[in-house]
Amino acid sequence: MKKKSKDLFNNIKKYLKKVKNEHLIKAYIKENPLFLTYIIVNIFNSTILRFYTINSLENYLAIKPIIADLAVIIILGSFGFLFKSRSKYRYFMVFTIIFTATCMINSVYYTFYTSYASFSMLSLTQFLGPVGDAVVQNVIQAKDLIFLLAPIILAFVNYKLKKKGIYKKIEFKQARKKNALKALIFGVILSCIFIISLTSLEIGRFTKQWNKEYVVMRFGIYVYQINDAITSLEPKINSMFGLDKALKEFEDYYQERSENENYPATNEYTDILKGKNILVIHAESLQTVALNTSFNNQEVTPVINKLAKEGLYFSNYYSQVSVGTSSDAELTFTTSLMPTQSGTAFVSYFDRKYIGLPKIMSDNGYYTFSMHGNNADFWNRRVMHEKLGYQRFYSKKDYDVTTENTIGLGISDKAFFHQSVEKIEKIAKENSKFYGQLITLTNHTPFADVDKYGEFDVDIKESTVEEDGSVGEVTYPYMEGTKLGNYFKSVHYADSALGEFLDELDSKGLLENTAIIIYGDHDARLPEKDYVRLYNYDKETDSIKSKEDPTYQEFGSYQYELNRKVPFIIWTKDKKYNKEITNVMGMYDAMPTLLNMLGIEKNKYALGHDIFSIKDNNIVVFANGNWVTNKIYYNSQKSAYLSLNINEEIEEDYIQNNTEYATKLLEVSNNLIVYDLIKNEEEKQNALNNPKEGS
Ligand code: GP9
Ligand code: MN
C-alpha cells in the first residue's frame, strides 16, 4: 500500500516536471484556444453573477464555487473534443448559450425576487406574469448584458481561428478521444477535490436546496441549477404511480375517522376567540426548557412566563417538524397536516391544494397577513404564504434592515417587531378584523452573536461577606461559553423583544380585542452534554455530578426527546382564560383547537384534534414514526419506550394500536400532499354536483 502511494506520488512529480520542462501548458494553450476560451468565458459569467447577487466579502474570496463551476464546465465541455472542428465549435457554443442563459435568467430573477431561479417555479404563472413585460422595461438592466459577451467572444475567437486556418492544423495533430479523456479526467479530479472539501453543513443545505444563496455561494450557479433540475423532478416522479391506491386509503381513512371518533363538537372553550383579532408569533427555536430555567433568580423568559401564567398555557406541546424545520412548523400549524416524507411541502409540493388557517380566516371576513424580516424566498414562503391564504406577506424588502439592526441571520427581533407595529396599526385601521403571523429570526442557531443579545448571566453568582464585613461576589463557571448557555442569552433577548412589542401594541390600543398566540417552531438542536451540565453541575467541585450521586438527573436520549417540547400560549389582555393544560399536544392540534375557539367549522382533513375535546386521549405523532401520549414516549426505530407514569402498566395492544395509528396517519398525510388529494376530492365532488359540466 505504502509502495503504491509512493509510486503514485513519484509519477505525479515526474509528470509535473515534464509539464514544466516541455512547456506543456503553453503547448496546451496553443493547441486548444477554443476550449480554453469556452472555459474562461463561462467561468467569467458565473463569477460575475455571484458578484452581482451576493454582496459579501466571503463571496468575493470564495474559491469553492469557482472549482465547482470549473468542474461542470470542463466535464460537459470535454465531450466537445469528440467532434470535428466545426461541430466542436457548435458544441461549445450550445453549452455557452445554456450557461449564459442560466446566468442571465438568474441575474434578472434575483433583481426581481432576491433569490435564484428554480425549474419547479416554471409552472407558476406569478413569475411569468408580472415579470413578462416588466422584465424588458425594468428588470433587465444594462449590467445583465455583460453575460452576452461570453457567446460573442467565443464566436469571435472561432472566427479568428478559422481565418488563420488553425483548425486544420490542430485537427490533424489531435487524437480526439485522447483529448476528450484528458479533459474529462481533469474535470473529475476537480470534482473530487471539491467534494472532499465539503462540510456536513454544506452537504445538508445542498440536499435541502432551499437556502439558495448559501448553495450558490458554496456550489456555484451551475451545480445549483443542475441540482435544482433534479430535485424539481422528484415530486413529479413521486406522484406518477400509485394514485388509485392512495386515493382509496385516503377516503377510507377520513370515513373511518368520522365514524369512530366521537369527541364532543363543542366545549367550554368554543367561541372564546370569536370575532377577536389574532396575532400569531412563530417564535424561532423557542423551547419550553427556556421557560423553566432561571439563573441567579433571573428567569430566562420573564415576559413569556408572565403570558403563560395569565393565559392558556399548553405545557406539554410538541413540534412535529421534519427536515423542513421552520416551514414544516408553519405547515403543521396552519393545515394540521404532517411534513412530507421526502423533500419539504413548502419547497417540493408548493403547487398542491392546502386548506390553510389563514384562508379559512379570510373566508370568515378577516384580513390576513404574515410578517418576516428575512428574504421572502426562504423556504419558498413567497409562494406558500399566498397558497395558505395570507393576503399580504411583509418580508425583508418591507423592512429597514441595516448593519446596526442586524443580529445573526438578519434583522433583529426588536427592530422587526418595532417596524411591524406601524404596519399592524395601519392594518387595524383599514380592516374590521385581522389575522396575522409574525415569524421571528434572532433566536436562530448558532446563537453566536452573543455580544448583541445584551447582559444575561448564565454562570452562578453568589454574594459573599468577608470577615471584615465587606460584601463581595463569587462566580461559579456554569453555562458561560456553552452552546446552551448562549442559547439562553439569545432567548432572553427574544423574550425582551416580545415584551417591547406587546408594550408598543398596548400603547396603541391594539391589544384590546386581540388574542396573542405564541408557539415555538421547533427545538434548537442543542447538545445533549450541555443539558447534562445544566441539570447536574456541582458548583462546589466545579464538575458534573457522578451518576451514583442520588441527586443526579438522568438525561439520555428519551429525556432529550421529551425536552424538545416547545411552548404554546394563547393570551388575551383581559387574562380571562388562564390555565395550564398539561395533556400532551402536537403542532397539528393547534388548528382544530383554535377553530373551535374561533367558532369556525372544523377542517375535515385536519389530522390533529381540539385538545379540549380529546383531552388525555391524545397522541402526538412525529415525522420519524415516534409518538408520545400522556402515558409513554415510543421510539419506533428502537421499538422501545419510556413510561411517563411509572405506576401504569402498558399493554402490548396499546403500543401496537398507537403504532398502527401513527403509521397510517403519516402515510395518509404524505399521500394527501404528494398526490394532491384534496384537489382530487374537490374535483370529484364538483363533477358529482354539476354532472353536465364534466360531459
Ligand atoms: C428562515 C427562518 C429559519 O427565514 O425562518 O428557518 P429554519 O432554519 O429554522 O428552518
Ligand atoms: Mn425555525
Image: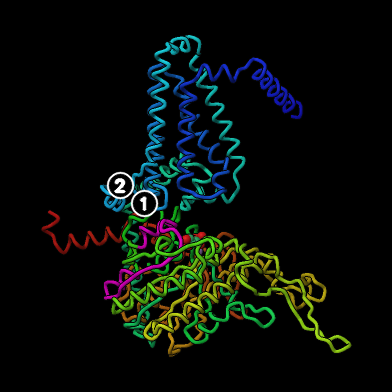
Does any portion of residue 516 appear in the rendered image? yes
Amino acid tagged 1: Phe
Amino acid tagged 2: Val
Residue 396 % position (x, y): 43, 61
Residue 303 inside the magenta-drawn segment: no
- Label 2 sits on residue: 135
Q: Is residue 137 left or right of residue 569?
A: left
Residue 368 inside the magenta-drawn segment: yes
Q: Nearer the viewer, residue 177 or 56?
A: 56
- Classify mark 1: residues with Cα within 10 Å, few (<14), some (14-19) or many (20+): some
Establish if 222 lies above or below 8: below
Bounds of the magenta segment? 358-385
Gap in angstroms between the C-alphas marked 1 and 2: 9 Å
For marks 1 and 2, the one nearer the N-term is 1
How many marks are shown on the rendered structure?
A: 2
Q: Are marks 1 and 2 in contact (CB under 8 Å)?
A: yes
